[in-house]
């Protein structure tokens, strides 16, 4: 770990030195940008909060979530027996098990629910939509699977139709928006209502309208076949007709390789048979439409419990999708992960280790880092990374370019010492953000090292960088 820490520290310093603050050439806009840079920053996002930040002035809650994230059931019982509240409220209104959704451990989460954690307790967070543990179990299901949602529904007696007082979102709306069919059908099978009026103003009229807005045409067709009402002329907001016509106009209707393509045209046909008309322009439906019944979307229990293969995280300007650690990429090993998040001005770092290893005694470590650094090119970052790695590996170490693309490079590094570090590094650039994903191992047998190399390389080739958050220049 010492070698890797040195590498990361030097690379961070190099990136920081290369970063410059650029303001608009327009003096009025530049004045606004400087004021924004000096303004107090919002609290740390929940995903990166420490225990002290999430539950300030509540050492019992801090101890409870620490025990839960490690799966220490006996310690959870001891703390609750001593007066710790499993529904203690922290930053952003999140109750104790909410932190565990960011540091998942099924045994710890289950025990909190068994000892009284309430998935229906409403979270209040300033002007944000009112939420709950049940809502966030859906929100996080694409990253951690649906087992946590199932525990909320079964053990915690979660209400699948929970509608907070602001009436803005039920859990099933989140599943629709995230296009998560596993979470959608789990809620549906536990009694979630699908034919009801959405009450948030200036939005959509029904769940079918909402699914169309989020280009979730698999679910749209299922809802249409179930007789869910839909609207055609909303005075405010977007109805199903507007959504489909917009998708035709923007070319989605001609995207034959999109997984939603056939479902989209099947929805068009369904609605046209009931009197709705669309203007195709240059796009026409496929000559033969699939006839698979939409009920087939009712996925099996095995698929619902399947572990995800990737992690999705908002980091700086990037909505980053990156692979699971090589030692934790199966359902059996998925929970063998401990993590630490750090956030500094312009930099976010996430470290992952197996639970039985420490920073001073490790065999495999995984580090994700994003640095907001306007003016830094990908090639310059790659050169700095290589120079830094060479210093850490020594003269006999090797660095090989595995892949070179306009927006990213993938490197393999190895020490000549059998006990030294080896690994794969992904270096990417998205807008003004440099992305570094590093998987490192050492002191493992040759077969394990070979397997790690193959897994890590395959995983790095699946990394996706999309538009995330807007980041203002910082001093």
Image: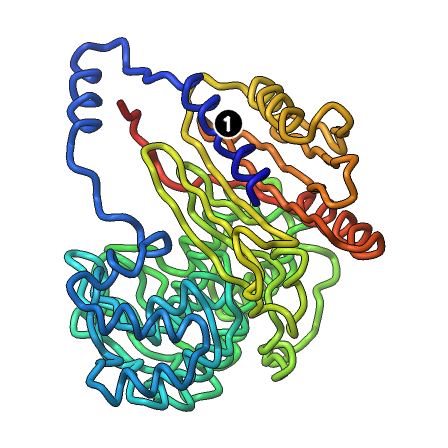
Q: How many marks?
A: 1
- Give the secondary structure at mark 1: helix
Q: Nearer the viewer, residue 368 or 399?
A: 399
Q: Residues within 10 Å of mark 1 (few under 14, many from 20)?
A: some
* Residue 88 position (above or below residue 151): above
* Quadrant assignment for the C terminus: top left
Residue 342 x/y as whole percent: 38, 45
Q: Which residue is at 50% across, 48% downward? A: 247
In this picture the colour scheme is rainbow
Q: Nearer the viewer, residue 456 or 354?
A: 354
Q: Which residue is at 37% across, 16% downward? A: 20
**Residue 135, quarter of picture:** bottom left
Residue 65 visible to the viewer: yes
Residue 291 x/y as whole percent: 70, 72
In the shown orientation, is residue 11 left or right of residue 122?
right
In the shown orientation, is residue 472 left or right of residue 241?
left
Residue 191 x/y as whole percent: 41, 88
Q: Which residue is mark 1?
A: 10
Residue 385 x/y as whole percent: 59, 26
* Residue 69 position (above or below residue 33): below
Residue 227 visible to the viewer: no
* Quadrant assignment for the N terminus: top right
Residue farthest right in this picture = 447
Q: Nearer the viewer, residue 184 or 48?
A: 48
Q: Which residue is at 63% across, 25% downward? A: 391
Q: Nearer the viewer, residue 216 or 97?
A: 97
In the shown orientation, is residue 446 left or right of residue 181?
right
């Amino acid at each position: 770990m010492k070698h890797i820490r040195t590498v990361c520290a030097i690379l961070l310093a190099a990136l920081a030195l290369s970063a410059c603050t650029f303001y608009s050439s327009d003096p009025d806009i530049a004045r606004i940008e400087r004021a924004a840079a000096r303004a107090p920053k919002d609290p740390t996002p929940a995903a990166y909060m420490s225990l002290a930040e999430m539950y300030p002035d509540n050492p019992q809650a801090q101890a409870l979530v620490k025990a839960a994230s490690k799966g220490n059931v006996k310690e959870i019982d001891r703390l609750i027996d001593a007066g710790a509240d499993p529904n203690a409220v922290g930053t952003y209104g999140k109750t104790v098990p909410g932190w565990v959704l960011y540091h998942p451990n099924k045994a710890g989460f289950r025990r909190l629910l068994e000892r009284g954690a309430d998935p229906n307790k409403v979270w209040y967070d300033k002007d944000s939509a009112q939420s709950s543990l049940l809502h966030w179990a859906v929100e996080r299901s694409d990253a951690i699977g649906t087992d946590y949602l199932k525990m909320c529904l079964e053990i915690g007696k979660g209400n699948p139709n929970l509608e907070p007082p602001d009436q803005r979102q039920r859990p099933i709306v989140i599943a629709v928006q995230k296009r998560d069919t596993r979470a959608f059908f789990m809620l549906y099978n536990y009694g979630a209502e699908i034919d009801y009026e959405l009450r948030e103003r200036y939005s959509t009229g029904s769940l079918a309208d909402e699914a169309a807005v989020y280009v979730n045409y698999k679910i749209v067709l299922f809802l249409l076949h179930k007789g869910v009402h839909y609207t055609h002329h909303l005075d405010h907001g977007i109805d199903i007709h507007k959504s489909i016509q917009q998708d035709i106009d923007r070319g989605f209707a001609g995207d034959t390789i999109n997984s939603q393509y056939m479902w989209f045209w099947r929805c068009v046909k369904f609605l046209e048979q009931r009197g709705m008309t669309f203007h195709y322009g240059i796009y026409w439906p496929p000559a033969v439409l699939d006839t698979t019944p939409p009920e087939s979307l009712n996925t099996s229990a095995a698929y619902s419990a399947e572990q995800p293969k990737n992690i999705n995280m908002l980091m700086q300007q990037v909505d980053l999708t990156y692979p699971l650690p090589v030692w934790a990429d199966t359902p059996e090993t998925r929970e063998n992960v401990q993590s630490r998040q750090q956030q500094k001005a312009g930099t976010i770092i996430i470290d992952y280790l197996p639970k039985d290893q420490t920073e001073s005694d490790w065999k495999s470590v995984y580090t994700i880092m994003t640095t907001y650094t306007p003016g830094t090119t990908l090639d310059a970052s790659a050169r700095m990374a290589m120079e830094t790695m060479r210093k850490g590996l020594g003269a006999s170490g090797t660095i090989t370019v595995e892949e070179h693309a306009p927006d990213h490079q993938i490197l393999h590094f190895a020490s000549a010492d059998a006990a030294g570090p080896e690994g794969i590094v992904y270096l990417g650039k998205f807008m003004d953000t440099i992305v570094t994903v590093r998987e490192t191992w050492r002191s493992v047998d040759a077969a394990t090292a070979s397997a790690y190399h193959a897994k890590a390389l395959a995983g790095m080739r699946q990394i996706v960088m999309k538009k995330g958050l807007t980041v203002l220049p910082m001093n």
